Structure formats: structure tokens, C-alpha cells
Amino acid sequence: MTASETVLASLEAGVLRLTLNRPDKLNSFNEEMHLALRAQIAFAHGSPEVRAVLLTGAGRGFCAGQDLGDRDPRKGGAAPDLGHTLETFYNPTLRLIRSLEKPIVCAVNGVAAGAGANIALACDIVLAAQSAKFIQAFAKIGLVPDAGGSWSLARILGEPRAKALAMTAEPLSAEKAADWGLIWKAVADEALMSEAEALARSLAAGPTLGLGLTKRLIQAAAQNSLDEHLDMERDLQREAGRSADYAEGVTAFLEKRKPEFKGK
Ligand code: T3D
């Protein structure tokens, strides 16, 4: 895997902790950071020792989206093909996050703007520091929400709130994001990282095969009819029921002890 200072990575107790690390630019994305993040999530896909991912940002922000210094029109030349940059950089990472059948916890430690907000929203369980804000900054520079934002906002919040957030670029506080069901919860700033770390560790020690199947089911719900979804639950429950973790979970319950799950 490509080593890069732009995404710090460490693996402990089954948790791959990834820290976006361009704090002087509020962890906005340049090409190097894109490639480094994608390589880390691809690593999580292929590595059995990774059982959960924790994504956060260094410094006072989570991520301010695209590095606009790399898009400076004053440098001249033709307008950039942003469709190409989405296809090449953002979309593959979004797809890797959604298709990773392991829990991804996001600890939004500060402002999350543009694609930075929407990458956070693509994660499975999002905790945010009380001082953090989510900003659909695109409207301020004449762009449309990307990195899956128009999809997640519309699905989670419905059209009225999605449109207002996207068209006004008004900052949404962590508390309100939690009240609206956009994230899991807002946490006191000083407690954010310990709480997120504890959650990621507890998920990593859990029945991660079953958690991965659960993610697949919940993500498929919006597209499926109830009939299709009942069939899918049947099939995935059959698979979960054959796992060593299921046998261990039931045995531990009957023996009144803590289960030792292996993610198998
Ligand atoms: O291009 C494509 O490939 C298409 C894909 C696009 C995806 C996108 O994400 S488009 C949206 C891009 N992001 C934005 O428009 C957000 C821009 N940033 C802001 O609006 C503000 O910085 C924030 C609201 C996020 C935070 O404000 P504040 O006052 O807390 O911080 P600040 O002073 O504005 O920023 C601190 C530093 O970070 C500052 O640098 P300096 O002056 O100290 O040297 C600022 O320039 C830098 N910074 C913040 N955001 C970006 C950035 N530098 C480059 N790109 C940024 N996006």
C-alpha cells in the first residue's frame, strides 16, 4: 500500500484508524490524499485483521472537501472536467466505503464541508463533536452536491431539508444533524475520540461477519420491495446462521459468559 502522510493509519485491536492529515488546509482533498484514503479502504476490504474502520481528521476540522487551491481559475487554461475528477477520485472511494462489509465509524472532529461532509455521511455510524458543523458548501461556488450528498440528504432528510441545505449552504450543527437523523449522535468535544474509539473497538470485537451482512441488508432496503427484502433477509440469515460467531454467541449466552467473536 502507498504510504502517505496525508492519511495517517494505524491498526490496533482490529480497528483501522484513519486520520485525514492536511490540517493547515482543513484536510481538504488533493490527489495524494484521495489515493491514500482509497488505498487504506481497499486494504480494509482485503485484510481479515481489519474488523472495523474509524475515520477522523487531524486538527480543528474533519474535511473541507476538494482543495480549491488545485482548482484556481486564475491559473488560466480550460475549465477542469469535474465529472472526470469525480469519476477518478471521489466515486471509487464512496463505492469502497459503501461496499465494505465491515463497520465504518466516522468521528467528525470539526467542520465537514462539501465532499468532506458527504464522505462522513457515507460512513455507517457517524459521531460528531458538538462544535462540528456540516456544510453543503457547493452552492457557494456554483457546484452541485457530490460524493453521494444529494443521494444521502434526499434519502435521509427528504426533499425539503435536503434542498434547503444544498441551496443555502447553511451550516448544520452537530446537534441538529443528530436531531434530524443525519448522524448517530453529537458528543461533547473532549469525549468524541474516546467514545468513537470505544465504539469502533466494540464493533471490531463483535460478530463482524453478521455486521457486514446487516450493512448489506440495510443499504438494500430502499431499492427492494418488501417481498424482495424478506427473501434477502432469509438468505443472509441462512448465511449468518452458519457462522462460527452465531454458534459462539448462542453458546456464550447459554453458558452465561461473554462471547468471543472471530468475524467468521
Ligand atoms: O473539484 C472537484 O474535483 C469536484 C469535487 C468537488 C467536491 C467539493 O468538496 S467542492 C466544495 C469545496 N469546499 C468548499 O467549498 C469549502 C471551502 N472552505 C470553507 O468554506 C471554509 O474554509 C470552511 C467553512 C470549511 C471553514 O471555515 P473557517 O473560517 O473555519 O476556516 P478558514 O479560515 O476558511 O480555513 C482555514 C484554512 O484552510 C485556510 O487557509 P489559510 O488562510 O489559513 O492559509 C483556508 O484557505 C484553508 N481551506 C479551507 N477549506 C479549503 C482550504 N484550502 C483549500 N481548499 C479548501 N476546500
Image: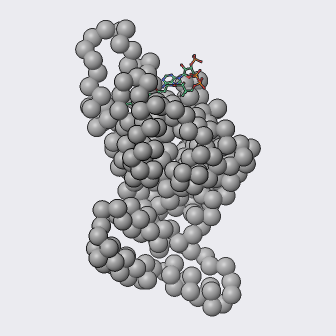
Which residue sits at x=47%, y=61%?
A: 102
Q: Nearer the viewer, residue 229 or 50?
A: 229
Which color mode does the image show?
one colour
Q: Is residue 260 visible?
A: yes
Q: Is residue 223 shown above or below 259?
A: above
Q: Residue furthest bottom?
A: 254
Visible in this render: residue 147? no
Q: Residue at x 28, y 37 (%)?
A: 87
Give me the residue at 39% from left, 46% from top.
Answer: 159
Residue lying at the far front of the rendered structure? 160
Quarter of the picture holding the N terminus: top left
Find residue 69 and report its image quarter: top left
Residue at horizontal 46 percent and vertical 34 percent from the top: 136
Coordinates of residue 125 in the picture (x, y in percent) = 54, 55
Q: Is residue 146 above or below residue 181?
A: above
Q: Nearer the viewer, residue 253 or 49?
A: 253
Number of marks drawn: 0
Q: Position of residue 113 (x, y in %)?
A: 50, 33
Q: Depth check: 190 or 204 in front? A: 190
From the top left corner, tell me how far across and down residue 173 is, in percent. Answer: 60, 40
Q: Position of residue 59 (x, y in %)?
A: 64, 32
Q: In front: 8, or 203?
A: 203
Q: Is residue 234 above or below residue 123?
A: below
Q: Residue furthest right?
A: 190
